[in-house]
Each structure stands twice: as C-alpha cells, then as structure tokens.
Image: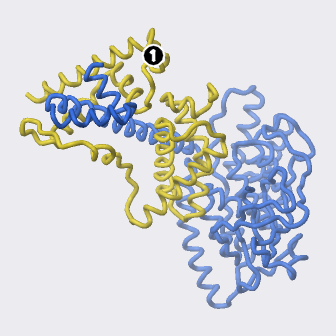
Chain colours: A blue, B yellow
Amino acid sequence: MSDFELIERYLADVLTAEEKKAFRARLLNDPIFNQEFQELKEIRLQVRKQAKSEALSFLTEVEQSISEDKTTKDQTVMKKVISIAASVVLIASLAYIGLLDRDLPSNSELYGQYFNSYNNLNGQVRGERSEELSLRESAMLAYDAGNYGAAVDMLATKVSEAPNATDYFYLGVSQMEIEEYDEAVVSFNTVINNFNAFKDQSKWYLALATLKTNDEDAYLGALANIIYNKSEYSVDAQSLLEQLGFDLDTELMDALVDGSVKKRPDEDSSPDGSQWDSTVGKRKMQWGIVRSLDGLEKYAFFTEEPLQDLFDGDRVLTVVIEKKLRGKQNSQNRGGYGRFKKELDGRVYVVDKY
Amino acid sequence: MGENSLIFRLRRGDKDALEEIYRLYRPSFIKWITYSHKCKEEQAIDIFQYAILSFYENVVDGVIEEMNDAGIKTYLYSIGKNKMLADNRRNSKISFNPDYEDRLLIEELDSEGEPLQLKIEKMKDVIQKLQNPCADILRLFYFNNLSTDEIAEIMGYKNGNTVKNLKYKCIQRIKKLLIITDE
C-alpha cells in the first residue's frame, strides 16, 4: 500500500486499531510522511467545507426562486402599501373614537374600512378563442371603469361558458361592489374549492363579504385561515380580527376531538374545476368539539380546510381564537356557535392533525 | 434502500434531490417554527437551511439510512428545534460554521516556518478554483463518502480504477498549484 493510500484509509477511518497505532507512531517519527499527511488532510477538509458552502448557496438559490414565484402576487403590493398606510390613519382615528364611547366598530364600519377593489392585473390575456378574449376584455374594461354591474353580467356569462378562477374572482369582487354579497360569497367559495389560483385573495374578500352579512363563523374561519397561512393579507386580517374584538393566540394548542365531527359539503370536490359537482360555491367547513389535553376546557372547533379522517379522540393542533370571560365580545353573534356558548370555554380553529 | 428514494439520491450528491427535499418540507417547517417558536420568517428560513444541511451531512456520513416521509419531517423538526433553542441561549445569529471539526486531532505542522493559517488560506483558494472533473470527484469522495466504483457509475467512467487514478492526479495537481502560488 502506498503512503497515499494509507493516509486516505486513515482519513476515511477504515484502519484497524493496530494499524492506527502504527500510523500515529510514524507521524511522529517521519516528517516527510507527516507533511504528506497534513496536506491530504487539509485538502479533504477544504473539499468538505467547499461542498457545504456550495450546498448552502444552492439552497439560497432555491429559496430565491421560491420567493420569485411569489412575485406575481407581489404585483399588488404597491397598491397595498398605499392602502395599508391609509388604514393606519383610519385605525388610529377609530381607536380614538373607541376610547370615547368604549364601543367596537360595527361590522359595516369595518367592512368600509377594509374593503378595497382589487386592482385588475389582468390586462394582457393569453391565447384564447377570440370571442372569449373580447368578452373578457370588455368585462375588464367595465371593471376598471367602475361599471361593476356590467362587469358582473359579462363575467357571469364568461364563467358559465368556461369556468376559471380569474373570472370567478373578479365576478366576486364586482358583486361586492354592487352589494350582492351572498352571490359574491358563492363566487369566492367556487374559487377556493375548485381552483388553485386566486385562493389567498378570495379568502380575504370572502372574509369581508361574510363580515358584511354578519356570518360570524364564516369570517372568523376565513380570517384565522389567512393569519395561520401567512398570506399577504395576514397583517390586515390580524388587525381586522382585533378590531372585531377577538384575540387570536398564535401559540398552537394541542387538543383532543371530543365527540363526532361534522363536515360539509360531504363530498370532496375536484381541485382543478374539471368536474362540477354539488360542492360548487359552497363553503367548506368541518366542525365539532375539542377538549384541552387536561380535559378541563371544552372548545367549539372549526376549520375551513376539512381534514381527512378526523374522528373522536384524535389529537389536533389548534389556534385559540377567543376565550370566554375575556372582556367584551362582539354582540353580533350568529350561527352555530352561539347555541353552545354557555357550556363552552371558547372557540378554536383547527390547523392540523397529528 | 430504494433506488429512487430521496435519501439514496441525496447520498449520491444529487442536487435535484436536495432541491426536492427543500421544497417539500419548507412550507410546513416554516409554518411550524414561526408559530411554535414565534420567530421571524427570515430566521425561520435560516434555521430551515441549517436543518436541511445537517440532514444532508448526516445522510452522506451514513448516520441516517432509509427513512419515510414522517421520519424526515420529525428529523428536520428536531434539528430545527435544537438549533432554535441553542441560538436563543447564545443569543447569536445563525451561522453554519464548519471550521472546527477534525483539525483538533492533528498535530501541529512544522512547515519551514510558514504560518499554518496562510497555508490553509492558500489551500482554500486552490480548492475553490478547482475545475471538473477534479472538483466533482473530490467532492463525491471526501464529502459524499462514495467509493470510487460509485463515483464511476455516477460520472460515467468505465470503472472505479479510472476514478482512483484521476483522483490521484487531481491531488497531485492541487499540490502543484500550492507550490506555484507559493512563489
């Protein structure tokens, strides 16, 4: 075995104890051998370091491409920066009023504060059939011009011919503009349930539309979902939730499902919109009761993203949205939770299952 | 070990596998750590990259063998959690510092009065500028701990002996370059 091979084997740690002993003895007594060893050892070390730093910069590149994937969404950021700045002023003044009469703003007031039309980024239309193209173009023209009634008509025609996320989304926003909130809710639920695009935006506008119709379970669910998923609307969602008088505790809490779990709609929909079934336009929801691990507290739970195979006794991760006896609550309660309110310690949003 | 498993591919230095693992576990990891440990996204990303690299290192060093999806997830989470706690204790920023390691067990080198640090800097420079196939061969050998036969298979050489000879030549080349930069 050459010295070179011997050293390689020593560095790879494949020599026997006996051989290692002899190897070390030689290092002490043979300066040339020692120098050869030092050099090889240093080469090996530097190659390893180099490989690690290459791997790290590769990961950084991957990370960058992931954040670049998000820039499509960020096209809206400039507009949002402006509207956030505006709402900071609004929040400040509302907080001031709040100090005077100790009342929370009504849902309608909050809606007015948070609702902004969505900036149409859809000017350029990719190759589709020419009639469709012109229909969408005129719909978007109407939308940009603020002629939302006409936009609703055209977009409704458009989605009945060729269902797609973009048109459903703009249809929903246009419907909100002309105060057809129930119809808007259907449009946004269609986007959320059946398509992959415009999901984050739809959840936010869904929260606002259901805020306007005072459907508390729906807007709390949508807001909790936005905050937990950290979409670009999470800052707005957080401050809206606070203004509604809720306190979302971002610390995750483990809990156990207690009793049966209900889900609606029962069937699962096709995510790409290829199949139109009874789930179209319906809000997805799953709900039931959980208790804390020590069994002392019981909460109503719900989630907008139903978990498969969730049964009595399963362990889940939750976000606590509100706890009973924690100051003043919004008086506009409606829906399922109100009935149980006296027996339960609050309400949680389920985010995941173990 | 499955031919196509991520771990198998990772061990063989497949960059696509590294990217796949990164993309696969990133969303849930970031969500989990920002929520459970209340850290900023930027820090979460640093910790995630650290966890992925540690995982990669443990795979190539043979600490980890085959593992299912849940196993990888748990593993990454535990690395992340420990890193997070250690950083908080030290209150220092994340750094991936491979500088320590096995230099400790090596006797000081008495090399004609040249300071050790300078020699290491030179070595670093030479290794960084190394071209292929030397760069790939040495990385697969010293970092991924692959045999010359495995390297031959990955790089499309006839057999392990070819790789062994090439590797020897690469080392000689590095030594030569070290002498040149000496002057």
Residue at point 77%, 39% (across, down): A164
Q: Position of residue A128 (x, y in %)?
A: 72, 27
Which kind of residue does numbered mark 1 sit on?
Ala
Q: Residue furthest top?
A: B158
In the displayed structure, does residue B46 sit left or right of residue B66?
A: left
Query: Quadrant of residue A69 in the image?
Result: top right
Q: Residue at x 61, y 36 (%)?
A: B66
Residue A100's place in the image compared with A152, above or below, is below
Q: Which of the two residues, A283 or A169, is positioned nearer the viewer here? A: A283
User: Would you say A214 lies left or right of A250 here?
Assistant: right
Q: Position of residue B109 (x, y in %)?
A: 16, 39
Residue at disc 1, secondary structure: helix
- Count neighbours of disc 1 (C-alpha within 10 A) and say few if under 14, some if 14 to 19, many if 20 or more: some
Depth order, front residue of B38/A139: B38
Q: Position of residue B114 (x, y in %)?
A: 9, 39
Q: How many marks?
A: 1
Quickly name the residue at label 1: B152
Expressed as whole percent of the image width and height from the top left, the position of residue A210 reads 80, 64
Residue A315, above or below B57: below
User: Viewed as shown, does residue A236 lie left or right of B149?
Assistant: right
Which sits in the foreground, B150 or A122?
Answer: B150
Chain containing mark 1: B
Residue in view at x 42 percent, y 27 percent: B140
Q: Quadrant of the C terminus of chain A?
A: bottom right
User: Which corner quadrant holds the N terminus of chain A?
Assistant: top left
Vertical side of A35 occupied by B173: above or below: above
In the picture provided, is A314 more to the left or to the right than B35? right
